[in-house]
Image: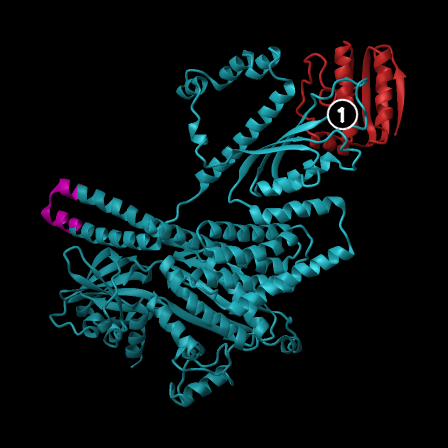
Chain colours: A red, B cyan
Amino acid sequence: MDYKVQDGAEATDITFRGDLTIQSAGQVRRVLREALDSCQTIKISLKDIESIDLSCIQIFCAAHKTAFKADKRLTLDAALPEAAALAIEQAGFDCLKDCGNNENACPVMRRTDG
Amino acid sequence: MNHIADAQSEVYKEEARELLTVLEDSLLQLERSPDDKELVGQIFRALHTIKGSGSMFGFDRIAAFTHEVETTFDLVRNSEIPVSKALIDHTLQAKDYIKLLLEEPTTDEAPCEQDLKTLIGSFNKLVSGHKETMTQNPPTNTSTTITSAQGASSSNAPAGLLTYRIRFCPASDIFLTGTNPLFLLDELQELGECRAVAQTNALSSLEEMNPELCYVAWDIVLTTDKGIEAIRDVFIFVEDTAAIHIEKVDSPGDGAAEEGYKKVGEILVERGDVKAEELKEALGEQKRIGDILIDKGIVTRDKIASALAEQEQVKEVREKKAKEEAASSIRVAAAKLDKLVDLVGELVTVQAHLSQKANSQADPELVLISEEVERLTGELRDNTMSIRMVPIGSTFGRFSRLVRDLSKELGKEIEMATEGAETELDKTVIERLNDPLVHLIRNSIDHGIEPPDVRESLGKTRKGLIQLTARHAGAQVHIEITDDGAGLDSARIREKAIEKGLISHDAEITEKELFGLIFAPGFSTAEKVSNVSGRGVGMDVVKRTIDALRGHIEVESEQGMGTTITLKLPLTLAIIDGLLVEVDKDYYVLPLSSVEECIELDHSKKTRQQDGRFVNLRGHLVPYVRLREQFGVKGDIPDVEQIVVTGSEGNKIGFVVDQVIGEHQTVIKTLSRVYKDVDSVSGATILGDGTVALILDISKLSQVGRCEGNA
């Protein structure tokens, strides 16, 4: 897995690549924590990832909850590889449309267009 | 209670017979298309239903035996055992054995115990062969666990779909044990319609979480027919560490659906007081109960999401079930249907009486009522007859197996094709047609189609073809049995006919008449008698059966090219449209479908041809038969008689009568055995005033006419 963090005027964009599995779960968590510590709005792109497993899906969910508590905004890009979309659906995260907050929706489901 | 149990057993037997037909058809199709997964599924479902219902209605032996076959097909379904000839052969034998168990009265011992053991041994061999292969080539994790779930499904499967609510809380260290919970959710998906909703309450913030631990639990709604044990088996490797709770929440048909009631909004829409869109808009403004509960902090959003998923799934399953029920038909005992036809027959007779009386009374009101009754009776008759009509496809389907088994036995390669399987015929006709068709097909296989090597040497394809075709032709159905075999040897038939004394040495007969001789009792040109055919017994039975059905047979054949035997049958045996005629004070009915026209026979304008029992019909000489003479009717001959011209077997022939009365709905009554040798009459009917009219067999009378005409 690798990633790229790009600070913009309105938001910080984080792009992940490769396999987001339990082997990289610690690193994903660290990247997101650092971003949440320093940025108000974070946009995550997973369009270039190869796969994602439950350990990483739950990290994005936790990141969202953290953002909500800190009154920050964290969103996920709408473009997802088919395998990743299927894994998220199979994990039962597809119906969490309003994860804890109406304004700051669950990053797994409420995807922006970038 | 016994009566109810008997009735239920009968229902099961009927269903099982249908399923066995489906099973056989699917197996024969699978033999041709071994990669067709849909067919494998169809076979598995048929076996599964036979087993499940068998167990429910006390057919334990069937349930136990079918279980063995089903287990094998479960492996086929999972692509763990390939579709092979041996598998098809064993399963076809198993089908025959299940049928035997179904029809055998209950005894302590299983019928043909040895066959049963051999058969079970064959299936075990197929399965053990599979196990050996599996040991040598162990499967991946996914397939192992799927097999375990599917295997369990065979033993604890309840009949019908059930919906379960499953709460699965894996141990937090599940990732560390190498188990991926998503694989378990995948396996549940394999069992049926499944929705999982992740519960993330335990997941608080990034700071607090350990990325190597699992913080997610699931609420799952699963609709399946596999049974609770199959669900438990999915969790077999995590059950010691995870919290798993499974409960049944809905089963279609348990009456829960009936408890629902219409909401005010639905009633208002139905009454037209509110439009559906207006109702939707108003409901959109209303705060939902889930939102209220979340706002009050009583439940989390996850819980509401999972409850909504459960509600939606149960609703979908119920809707699906309701749709299936609405589209289904009802099963009625054939005897009740026969009784209904009898009653309609009686009604037609009474209606004829009423019409006759009304017309003679000259009472306009009575005539009006009588005409209305006539119209309704006609509709009732047509509807009742249509209920009895069944497609001939089910009969055709049975012959695929016959062709398969017999060609194998005789070392021939034969393909059977059918056309017009949807053609409908009266169920009585179809039932009686089975034996003649079996005889004709057996003959085609044994005498018609040549062995593969011979065919090749003749420049034909190795595989012979038997084609069964059915089509409507007016009030008749024509069924053709065509083969591309050797064809009939007219010289040999002639020789044999002379030998049997059926024709004289110098007899001049057409090829068609010559071919007709193969239906004579004891006639066979086969060099040797096989256990399939050759004794000359079958064909005369075919002829007799078809005659009894008021049909007739035509044979066309070209040596070296093949033979086509056409059975021409009436659509129904119960009620026909007839033409009522009178000779002196006697009444006769001619089937209207054979009548072409009626002309006068004026004795004051006698011509030479009329004297010779021919009438000149627009330049063509048409022979005629005097019914008066045929039935020995005495009395004065009117100056002007009527000739009813009919078309039979491609030839025209006239029947001279005193008077043509008109169309008549004819309820066919069979004559007693006393008249069994009277060829020219096929039955009788009762007229409105109670008089009996004979129904004429035009085909037989035509033969008389032609003989007399030629004389």
Residue at x 25% of width, y 45% of height: B375
Residue neighbourhood size for the residue with mark 1, other residues' Cα within 10 Å, grouped as few (<14), some (14–19), many (≥20): many
**Three-letter residue code for mark 1:** Gln
Quarter of the image where one finds residue B146: top right
Task: Determine the chain carrying the residue at label 1.
Answer: A
Viewer-side residue, A17 vs B155: B155
**In the rendered image, is residue A2 in sight?**
yes
Magenta range is B354-368
Furthest residue toward front = B240
Instruction: Indicate whether B447 appears above or below B383.
Output: below
Residue at x 69% of width, y 18% of height: A99
Please name the residue that numbered disc 1 is placed on: A58
Residue at x 45% of width, y 68% of height: B437
In the figure, is residue B612 to the left or right of B319?
Answer: left
Q: Dot 1: what SS?
A: helix
Q: Where is residue B702 in the image (x, y as percent from the top left)?
A: 31, 72
Whether residue B337 appears in magenta in the rendering, the answer is: no
Viewer-side residue, B473 vs B419: B419
Furthest residue toward left = B361
In the figure, is residue B276 to the left or right of A104?
Answer: left
Instruction: Indicate whether B25 appears above or below B552.
Output: above
In the figure, is residue B456 to the left or right of B533?
Answer: right
Viewer-side residue, B258 vs B104: B104
Quadrant of the image containing the C terminus of chain B: bottom left
Mostly what secondary structure, the magenta segment? helix
Whether residue B359 appears in magenta in the rendering, the answer is: yes
Q: Position of residue B81 (x, y in %)?
A: 68, 56
